[in-house]
Image (cartoon, coloured by chain):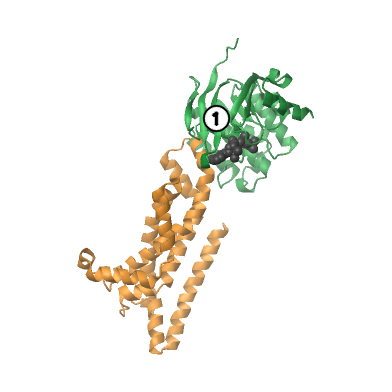
Chain colours: A green, B orange
């Protein structure tokens, strides 16, 4: 039996986009504590689902309930395309520290900068950073919010293997050592395997299955997920 | 000559400043509210007003100041205040339109980001203003440029009264028509110098 608490409970979510396009259809599922990886083909609705979960987009119908021990201020979001302010790396971080609602000293910016190899770039204008560096800074900024739930939309898309594994192992440590709940989308199966306590598989705006991580990669239950996994096996 | 220059600067700086102060909240409002019908209408009107012929604005204000009860009682016609009013009307849409699109891109890109941070309305406005200072500066200068260079409206509502409502542009018109070409060229070069300084300042801010 499952004793874990839900961090998000999605109830019959539907989301209708511009031109009446049905992005999410009658989506119901629980996301549990730990690491949840959302998989699915391009256009399956992963980004849209994350935004609805995090309260950035209102669903057309249905609702998202946040787990009892969380408030909306415990959620941080790392966007697929990093969003930064037009100022230096350090000033970006300072801004977050200044406006954040969860005060307290959860993470130290200097440690994170050091770990992700950005400590030499503190005085760089954020706009001049490389794609991977921007992605790392966005992650650090999200962590400065002291989140209990960290939502990440393809945090390692378009970046090299070294950066990818740096980010991946930081996420792993956050989850295992700091108890941060992670909800993430990715197209990288090895990353999914490493971070997923459970997998949510999305297909055409619906969730076709929610399965424990280790089980999922052995044998997904639903047809679409099986095809998806098989396509990686070749 | 110095007097004309001072009047020109006084009127146009005052007008562009008033227009700017009015424009800033409108710009922030326009970029903040998402797709509403009223917003589209206002944007469209401002875009059209952006290219209003100054002579036409002058004419409308002339009629208002001459005949419309309330405005008539204020006895504005042929005063510097009338010229300021005309230039405010002319530069306001220019300032809004010039700043709007780039600030909208800035805000659209960061809407989700601001939401995640749970910024208060004031924190949001503050960061938008701080991060777009250069855009606002450029918009102001473009508005000032519009004020300094127009002649149609100031001549009609100001009357080009010597020592009072005569500015660079209107005296160039006058001197040319009188055949005082030397004088006209002299004034023209002064205006040109101001506008070059203005453009260079704009370029400087845009490069930042
Ligand atoms: N506002 C919108 N209006 C209309 N359609 C939209 C809107 N937003 C997203 N869509 C459509 O909904 C579908 C799901 O989009 P979404 O970005 O959630 O997919 P995704 O699973 O994140 O894909 P990817 O793996 O490529 O990132 C896509 O077909 C997209 O075109
Ligand atoms: Mg996506």
Task: Estimate the x, y position of residue A228 in percent, counting from the top left.
Answer: 71, 28
Residue placed furthest toward the bottom: B179
At x 57% / y 12%, what residue is drawn? A3
Q: Is residue B18 visible?
A: yes
Residue A185: x and y, percent?
63, 31
Q: Residue B178 lies in what quarter of the image?
A: bottom left
* Furthest-right residue in this view: A234
- Residue at 41% x, 89% y is B180
Q: Quadrant of ligand 1?
A: top right
Residue A114 located left or right of residue A232: left
B113 relative position to A118: left or right: left
In this view of the protein, which residue sits in the foreground, A200 or A44? Answer: A44
Circle 1 is placed at which residue position? A25
In this view, B87 is above or below A193: below
Q: Residue at x 63, y 46 (%)?
A: A124
Host chain of mark 1: A
Q: Residues within 10 Å of mark 1 (few under 14, many from 20)?
A: some
Query: How many marks overall?
Result: 1
Where residue A39 sits in the image (x, y, percent)? 65, 29
Classify mark 1: helix, strand or loop.
strand
A141 or A46, nearer to the observer:
A46
Residue B87 location, x and y as percent? Answer: 37, 67
Res. B6 in view:
no
């Amino acid at each position: 039996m499952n004793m874990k608490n839900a961090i998000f409970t999605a109830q019959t979510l539907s989301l209708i986009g511009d031109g009446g396009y049905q992005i999410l259809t009658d989506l119901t599922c629980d996301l549990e504590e730990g690491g949840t990886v959302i998989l699915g083909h391009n256009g399956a609705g992963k980004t849209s689902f994350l935004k609805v979960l995090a309260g950035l987009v209102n669903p057309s119908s249905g609702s998202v309930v946040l787990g009892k021990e969380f408030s909306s201020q415990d959620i941080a979001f790392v966007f697929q395309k990093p969003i930064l302010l037009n100022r230096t790396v350090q000033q970006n971080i300072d801004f977050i520290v200044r406006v954040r609602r969860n005060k307290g000293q959860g993470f130290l910016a200097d440690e994170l900068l050091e770990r992700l190899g950005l400590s030499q770039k503190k005085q760089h204008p954020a706009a001049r950073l490389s794609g991977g560096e921007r992605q790392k800074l966005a992650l650090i900024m999200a962590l400065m919010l002291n989140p209990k739930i960290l939502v990440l939309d393809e945090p390692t898309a378009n970046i090299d293997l070294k950066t990818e594994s740096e980010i991946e192992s930081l996420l792993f440590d956050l989850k295992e050592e700091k108890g941060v709940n992670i909800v993430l989308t990715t197209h990288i199966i090895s990353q999914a395997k490493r971070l997923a306590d459970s997998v949510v598989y999305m297909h055409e705006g619906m969730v076709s299955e929610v399965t424990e991580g280790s089980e999922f990669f052995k044998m997904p239950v639903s047809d679409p997920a099986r095809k998806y996994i098989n396509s990686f096996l070749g | 000559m110095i007097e004309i220059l001072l009047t020109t600067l006084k009127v146009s700086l005052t007008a562009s400043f008033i227009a700017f102060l009015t424009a800033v909240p409108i710009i922030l409002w326009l970029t903040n509210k998402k797709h509403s019908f009223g917003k589209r209408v206002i944007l469209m009107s401002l875009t059209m007003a952006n290219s209003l012929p100054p002579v036409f604005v002058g004419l409308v204000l002339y009629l208002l100041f001459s005949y419309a009860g309330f405005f008539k009682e204020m006895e504005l016609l042929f005063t510097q205040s009338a010229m300021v009013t005309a230039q405010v009307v002319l530069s306001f849409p220019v300032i809004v339109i010039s700043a709007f699109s780039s600030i909208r891109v800035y805000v659209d890109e960061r809407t989700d980001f601001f939401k995640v941070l749970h910024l208060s309305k004031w924190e949001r406005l503050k960061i938008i203003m701080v991060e777009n200072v250069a855009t606002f500066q450029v918009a102001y200068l473009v508005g000032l440029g519009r004020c300094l260079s127009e002649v149609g409206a100031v001549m009609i509502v100001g009357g080009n009264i010597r020592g009072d409502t005569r500015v660079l542009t209107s005296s160039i018109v006058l001197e040319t028509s009188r055949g005082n070409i030397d004088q006209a060229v002299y004034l023209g070069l002064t205006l040109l110098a101001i506008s070059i300084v203005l453009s260079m300042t704009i370029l400087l801010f845009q490069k930042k």
